[in-house]
Image: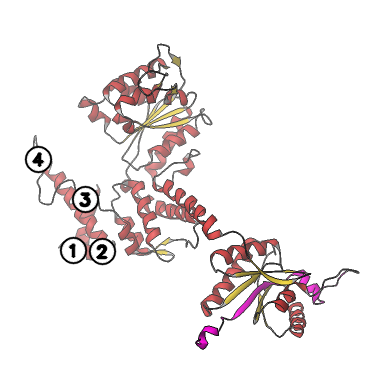
Amino acid sequence: MPIWLCVMNKQILLSWLGMTDLKAGGQISVRTGEVIGEGPVLGALNKLPFVELHLLHDQEKPMVDAYTAWLTSQTQIKVIPVKCSLCSPIDFGDIHQAVDGYLHELTTTEPDLDISIHLSPGTPSMTAVSILLGKTKYNTRFVQSSKDKGGAFVSIPFDISAEYIPKLIKKADKKLTQLANSEVPLSAAFDDIITQNPDMKRLIVKAEKIAVRDVPALIMGDSGTGKELFAKAIHNSSLRTGKPFITVNCGAIPKDLIDSELFGHVKGAFTGANTDKKGYFEEADGGTLFLDEFGELPADAQVRLLRVLQSGEISKVGDSKTKQVDVRIIAATNRNLANEIAQGNFREDLFYRVAIGILTLPPLRDRAGDIALLSEYLIKKINQEASSQPNYINKRISIKAKNIILNHSWQGNIRELQGALLRASIWAEGDEISEADLQDAMLERPQTQTAGELLEIGDGIDIKEVLDDMKTKYITQALKETAGNKKKAAKLLNIKNYQTLTNWIDKLET
């Protein structure tokens, strides 16, 4: 057999210095009649084949030196005292920092060490932290001591990595998925709207006034601008707070099921109606019904919805009886309903019935000062939601990545920014989201027309608007490629100097 196969890795024992060990070593007086024996540490060293003891402690140096001298008089094993600063012997944070830091140092310096952790000395908090780190991050063995049998290796009869960490990861990933889906918490309030933009602040004031009046509201704005956040904040600031808040995506309901979904049905009303079913109006009775994608409702559903809003009565599919409901409507749409009305796609009377309190949310690109603020808020939120992931490192956004964020148009608004930062936090290896990480995380938007393809002139086009749109797109792309460096961007666009580029940008933004 080759000689190297017989060589074992150096076996060391890592242990806290506990009160029982100090008593056994004569460093603490013992009351009459109490039998201490050798103590847990010496009991383990006398029974098990360790060559070194690494003794973690938070005691005064003279006491530790005296105990170490006594211990070395009882055994030939090398003792290495390790001073740890704890605010309390039961403080999980300090204990974790001490044990994790020392084990990291040991395994980095000597990767092939055979490390065992003594679970008997110290406080229950020290034992718990030792088990968690030993079973997950460092793959150590464990030792326990008893007065009768001394020290012995013990197995922990569960696998934290296999049984518990996957559940923690799943829970953290669920939170991140909710964040990626822009799911708004039911407890959302106006304080949750992150802004320093004057126009947004004026909108919040208007929304607060709408909230206290029990009237319908219509929130308009591009996708991803925060319409649901405003809707929930209005509900939570209204007299209906604490009552149901029911969200309905009008564009996701199949046309032939709209009546059943909104108003409910009775058993036998149609094939598959095996039981009575409440509709969204009945579920929201006393509270708020949030009709998202309001502009997607088909014409016949608009008629029936108008009738309910006028009378406050619903009739289930298959039932001749009516029922009175008390529901506040908050509708939201990313469509221009004035254009939809002009084209005959939306009922004007329904629009005026709902559009009492009107809010029009601006796109993110028009919220001066908010992009940087939201970026920092979102990355902090991402770090919080991912904190239970094993070995997750909190991320921060580098200066170059921030420049890209500030110079991007964010056509998908807050939702697009949130998704890009979430992806970048996954790609980033260390604690910083780099320029490359962010560029990899940003999605290319599909082109509405192929390069070189002319727009249909039809009844005419606004050539200045078309040219300005092209300028905006190319300037945005150039700034993205150069991480916001106007001098380099001007060179890419064959513009004489960056001042000319700045003038173009100023004109396009007015």
User: What residue type is disc 4 on?
Assistant: Glu
Disc 2 target residue: 482
**What is the crowding at mark 3: few (fewer than 14 residues within 10 Å), some, or many (at least 20)?**
few
Where does the image place residue 299, in percent across and percent down from the top left?
A: 27, 23
Closer to viewer: mark 2 or mark 4: 4
Mark sitting earlier along the chain (3/1): 1
Q: Secondary structure at mark 1?
A: helix
Do labels 3 and 4 touch, CB within 8 Å? no
C-alpha span from label 2 to label 4: 33 Å
What residue is disc 4 on?
Answer: 456
Return the residue nearer the eye: 400 or 153.
153
Q: Which residues are magenta?
A: 1-30
Q: Nearer the viewer, mark 3 or mark 2?
A: 2
Circle 1 is placed at which residue position?
492
Q: Are marks 2 and 1 in contact (CB under 8 Å)?
A: yes
Q: Nearer the viewer, residue 450 or 42?
A: 42
